[in-house]
Image: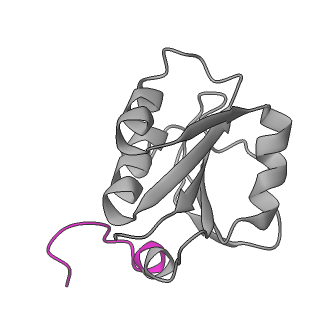
Amino acid sequence: MRRDGILHPQLAAALAALGHTDTLVVADRGLPLPDGPETVQLAVVPGVPAFSVVLQAVLAEIVCQSAMVAAETPADALWLQTVREAVPEVTEVPHEELKRLTWSARLVIRTGESVPYSNIVLRCGVPF
């Protein structure tokens, strides 16, 4: 039994399997998901779990060298500030491009978030 960190067994294993330059997506409940990447469905009911809670937990578990968010994301989105503090390079791309980037991701994590544009592509780094 884990003492802390991500307790969901499928999610913990999927994160542990990521390597340098692999990408993963943390998504709201509306983002179209491709068939290719492993998908961990966490959504229970609308809003649960919240995107920001899942994002913070993921960022605490991995080394992240860069992130991509939709240019349409409101500048006052609270989770965006968390990302800017935790990730060295944050790039804004059109939402349609962000959706295309999910096809090359190794992992997609679906949250219950209902706020539009609560999606992010994270690129893994190395701890040295």
Point 80% across, 31% down: residue: 94
Left or right, 96 with reference to 37: right
| In the image: residue 25, left or right of residue 36 | left
Q: In x, y percent, where is residue 14?
A: 51, 78
Q: Residue furthest front?
A: 128
Q: Nearer the viewer, residue 27 or 83?
A: 83
Q: Position of residue 113 (x, y in %)?
A: 55, 39
Q: Residue at x 35, y 35 (%)?
A: 85
Q: Nearer the viewer, residue 100 or 86?
A: 86
Taking the magenta stretch, the answer to whether it contains residue 9 is yes
Highlighted magenta segment, given as a residue range: 1-12
Q: Nearer the viewer, residue 14 or 10?
A: 14
State which quadrant residue 69 falls in: top right
User: Which residue lies most toward the left here?
Assistant: 3
Q: Position of residue 95 (x, y in %)?
A: 78, 34
Up-down: is 44 above or below 83? Answer: below
Residue 86 lies left or right of residue 35; in this view the side is left
Q: Identify the image quadrant of residue 33.
A: bottom right
Q: Quadrant of the N terminus?
A: bottom left
Q: Position of residue 102 (x, y in %)?
A: 75, 57
Image quadrant where one finds the C terminus: bottom left
